[in-house]
Image (spheres, rainbow, N blue to C red):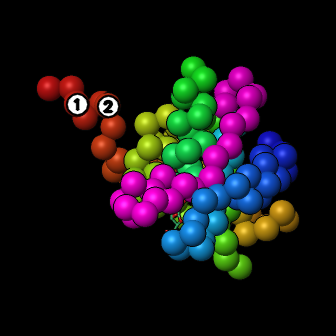
Amino acid sequence: MDYRELVRKALEIRERAYAPYSNFKVGAAVIMEDGKIYSGCNIENASYGATNCAERTAIFNAVTEGNRKLKAIAIVGDTTTYTYPCGICRQVISEFCDEDTDIILVKNEKEYLTKKIDDILPGAFTKKDLIK
Ligand code: THU
């Protein structure tokens, strides 16, 4: 699958980041099973813990629109290397992905790595674990 458009969207939406505290802008874009794309940036807060990461903003935008099946997510930080999702975002990605979902770590428009959820969150706690 060609993820160039998704990668461009993540790079573009990074500019919307509200990151006056860390000055570290992040953009994320998700493509859903039906082909729709949603995007999000990190949104910080004076009460630091209220910050929302770009990945969660993008996924919450999709879910809010009734779209829950992630085909791929592209993530780009504000660095010359790859930005991996934080632990909370890995857990949120795992809620809406399956084992084939591509997690694309973007360095720039031409260089990116593709991971699966089991690579970055092995042994994830999921809804299956809630069955008694
Ligand atoms: N951040 C993200 O948006 N996604 C990540 O995967 C890593 C961290 C944000 C949170 C905070 O606004 C800033 O990057 C620095 O941690």
Q: Is residue 7 visible?
A: no
Residues in magenta, as a range: 32-52
The x, y position of residue 64, in whole percent, is 55, 26
Instruction: Give the numbered dot on residue 127.
Output: 2
Relative to 87, residue 98 above or below: above
Q: Quadrant of residue 128?
A: top left
Please give the residue where the numbered disc 1 appears in the rendered image: 130
- What's the residue at 32%, 31% (across, down)? 127
Relative to 38, residue 10 above or below: below
Q: Quadrant of the C terminus?
A: top left
The x, y position of residue 36, in whole percent, is 74, 29
Q: Pick out the residue farthest to the bottom.
A: 80
- What's the residue at 60%, 59% (across, down)? 18
The x, y position of residue 80, in whole percent, is 71, 79
The x, y position of residue 26, in whole percent, is 63, 61
| In the image: residue 110, left or right of residue 30 | right
- What's the residue at 60%, 23% (across, down)? 65
Relative to 16, residue 131 above or below: above
Relative to 121, residue 126 above or below: above
SS of the residue under disc 2: helix
